[in-house]
Amino acid sequence: MSQLRPHLQQAEFIEQIRYQMKEGYKILFLEIEEQTLAIAGFRINTSLALGRFLYIDDLVVDELKRSQNYGQQLFQWLVEYARNNSCEHLSLDSGVQRFAAHRFYLMQRMSITSHHFSIEL
């Protein structure tokens, strides 16, 4: 996860994860021989626009293990989890600079359905 969120220090990261878990955040990871290869953070939400949906906050494969289907395995598990939990959609936001991630999402048959706007406060 530190490869995706390098701005967080370990103690701050753990505190933040615990806080988010109180709000329904869950962590999924793929481990082989005690080595974590891919990780996802997600939650189920409901909104007027989407109904019940699974939102992926974080999805990352170890930079040395990419293109070996680990991300796809996690993604497919998340799709099935969403279906099994009566979600109508699965969604995520991705930074505009993350071209490789965008290719991956498009290969997973995701569509670009909106623009995300934000302002730092």
Image (tube, rainbow, N blue to C red):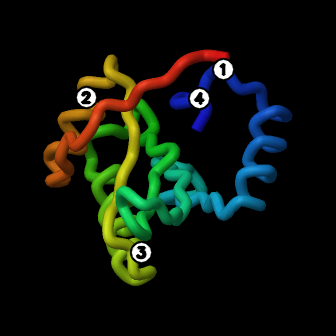
CB within 8 Å, label 1 to label 2: no
The spot of residue 111 in percent (x, y) is 17, 47
Image quadrant where residue 106 sits: top left
Q: Which residue is mark 4?
A: 5
- Say which mark, if any, is on residue 100: 2
Report how far apart the C-alphas of labels 2 and 3 lie in the structure.
24 Å
**Quadrant containing the C terminus in the rendered view:** top right
Element carrying mark 1 = loop
The 10 Å Cα crowd at callout 4, few under 14, some 14 to 19, many 20 or more, is: few
Inspect the image, locate mark 1, and give the three-letter code of the amino acid beneath it. Answer: His
Element carrying mark 3 = helix
Q: Which residue is mark 3?
A: 81
The spot of residue 19 in percent (x, y) is 79, 50
Mark earlier in primary sequence (1, 3): 1
Image quadrant where residue 10 sits: top right
Inspect the image, locate mark 2, and give the three-letter code of the amino acid beneath it. Answer: Ala
Report how far apart the C-alphas of labels 1 and 2 lie in the structure.
21 Å
